[in-house]
């Protein structure tokens, strides 16, 4: 049995890992050369703490307020687009307490399974990628955000997560070299972090050694369908003069192309309500790492990851058509938030190198990474068989949680493809729900 995976990001590679393990002959079509995409610039979090879907109460009202602030972490690029309007209406309908309540447990189960599977990769002799199961701290500075975080903690504990509430003194004791200026925090002890760039590099090498065929710079331009099944895929090599090449009679096709999945699904008559959400990150080398724990600055919606010799800062959600434009005020907003929470960074040479706004603006394309997160209309990923195409499986729509959910997604796809019972329930993630 042969499987073609469209998409060479972390979801596609994880799916290839488990399908190949189950005896499938696997090929991956990657539109890039394997050195870009959300899998490389993300924060490296494995986040059971993110059990609440993106669509939840309060998101719309807060998002509207943020749209009028240039430095805010949220922006919707206005457009007369049926896709954006349809996605928006479905998203608004999903922003309710009932949806969050129904989704929390399936999301937590998916995230916990994925963290455990990723930990198994690290503990084996196959892959090593700076895995650290030290949790993540959500810091808050105001009573408003404290109230919201305590509600999240209550729900998380009901789901079985280990969470410790920290007061100001305890937060500062956790980070003695860079004491945060905060009201308090919530330490989600089930979370972990890793270095995604190293994971991606090693997964590519590991899969190719095991016989997975990875075709880079391969843009799928046509998908042919016959009697309800994909019969052929045609792709063009963007790094050569080859006009196109065709793969015929695939037993299984897995669509794991992130934000590019929707137009590819449309080729075979499938509809995925989804929009790309652009996010930014900046990474700086630090010879002496002072920050000990990954953290999220709740009021600013900024995440910080401290690896041994580097620091990554990320944020923003820009929803709209894909483009290469980086909005400098939003980058500025990210960098200004960090010393508000960690005043020690105001005088830190490594951070100042990144926060030199004049130089940053001049070289923004070099210093700021951006990628597109695939946003489903209800905040839950699409994992399972397509509605109208018998041999097509969907594995996309993970939003900011692609890395967090990748291993579990790959495992579930391999189980469903083989007709096996799945490790966890998958009903909430069924692509046929729209």
Image (tube, rainbow, N blue to C red):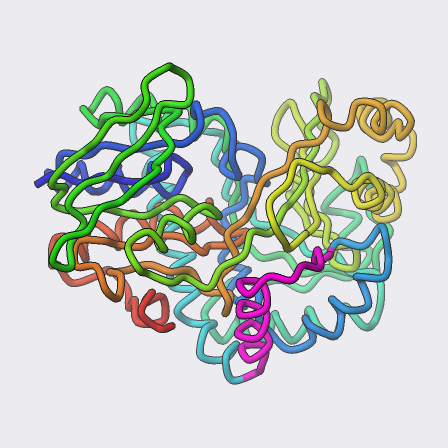
In which quarter of the view is residue 382 placed? bottom left
On the rendered image, what quadrant is the C terminus found in? bottom left
Residue 115, can we see it?
no
| Magenta-colored stretch includes residue 290 | no
Q: Residue at x 60, y 45 (%)?
A: 322
Foreground pick, 76 / 58: 76
Give the residue displayed 65% in from the left and 42% down from the top. Answer: 293
Left/right placement of residue 75 relative to residue 404 reads: right
Q: Is residue 277 above or below residue 196?
A: below
Residue segment shown in magenta:
74-97
Using the image as rendered, state which of residue 287 and residue 238 is in the foreground: 238
Indicate yes or no whether the magenta region holds residue 77. Answer: yes
Residue drawn at the location 83% of the way across and 71% of the way down: 143
* Picture quadrant where residue 350 is located: top right
Count of all numbered marks drawn on residues in the image: 0
Q: Position of residue 72 (x, y in %)?
A: 81, 54
Q: For residue 413, say whether it is visible.
A: yes
View extreme (bottom): residue: 98
**Closest to the observer, 19 or 433:** 433
Residue 231, how many percent across, how many down?
A: 15, 45
Quarter of the figure with the N terminus: top left
Residue 135, position as x, y percentages in the image: 56, 49
> Where in the figure is residue 158, as x and y percent of width and height?
49, 76
Q: Which residue, as the protein is rendered here, is positioned at the far front?
A: 243
Residue plotted at (70% across, 49% down):
316
Q: Along the horizontal axis of the image, is 57 left or right of 398? A: right
Quarter where residue 185 is shown: bottom right
């Amino acid at each position: 049995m042969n499987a073609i995976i469209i998409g060479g990001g972390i979801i596609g590679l994880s799916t290839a890992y488990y399908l190949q393990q189950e005896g499938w002959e696997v090929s991956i079509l990657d539109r890039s050369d394997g050195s870009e995409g959300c899998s490389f610039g993300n924060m490296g979090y494995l986040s059971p703490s993110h059990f609440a879907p993106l669509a939840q109460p309060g998101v719309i009202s807060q998002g509207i307020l943020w749209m009028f602030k240039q430095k805010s972490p949220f922006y919707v690029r206005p457009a007369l687009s049926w896709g954006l309007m349809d996605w928006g209406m479905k998203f608004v309908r999903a922003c309710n307490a009932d949806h969050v309540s129904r989704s929390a447990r399936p999301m937590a189960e998916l995230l916990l399974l994925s963290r455990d599977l990723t930990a198994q990769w690290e503990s084996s002799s196959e892959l090593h990628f700076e895995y650290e199961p030290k949790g993540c701290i959500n810091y808050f500075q105001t009573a408003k955000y404290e109230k919201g975080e305590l509600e999240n903690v209550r729900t998380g504990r009901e789901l079985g997560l280990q969470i410790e509430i920290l007061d100001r003194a305890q937060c500062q004791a956790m980070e003695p070299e860079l004491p945060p200026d905060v009201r308090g925090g919530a330490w989600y002890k089930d979370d972990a972090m890793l270095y995604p760039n190293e994971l991606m590099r090693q997964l590519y090498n590991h899969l190719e050694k095991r016989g997975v065929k990875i075709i880079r710079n391969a843009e799928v331009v046509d998908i042919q369908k016959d009697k309800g099944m994909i019969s052929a895929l045609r792709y063009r090599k963007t790094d050569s003069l080859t006009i196109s090449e065709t793969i015929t009679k695939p037993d299984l096709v897995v669509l794991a192309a992130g934000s590019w999945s929707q137009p590819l699904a449309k080729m075979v008559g499938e509809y995925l309500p989804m929009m790309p959400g652009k996010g930014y990150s900046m990474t700086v080398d630090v010879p002496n790492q002072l920050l000990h724990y990954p953290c999220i600055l709740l009021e600013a919606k900024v995440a910080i990851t401290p690896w041994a010799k580097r620091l990554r800062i990320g944020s923003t959600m820009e929803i709209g058509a894909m483009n290469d434009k980086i909005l400098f005020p939003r980058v500025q907003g990210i960098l200004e938030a960090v010393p508000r929470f960690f005043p020690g960074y105001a005088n830190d040479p490594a951070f100042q190198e990144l926060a030199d706004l004049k130089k940053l603006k001049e070289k923004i394309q070099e210093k700021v990474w951006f990628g597109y997160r695939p946003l489903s209309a209800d905040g839950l990923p699409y994992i399972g068989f397509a509605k109208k195409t018998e041999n097509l499986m969907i594995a996309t729509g993970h939003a900011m949680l692609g890395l967090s959910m990748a291993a579990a997604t790959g495992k579930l796809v391999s189980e469903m493809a083989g007709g096996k019972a799945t490790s966890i329930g998958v009903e909430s993630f069924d692509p046929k729900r729209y």
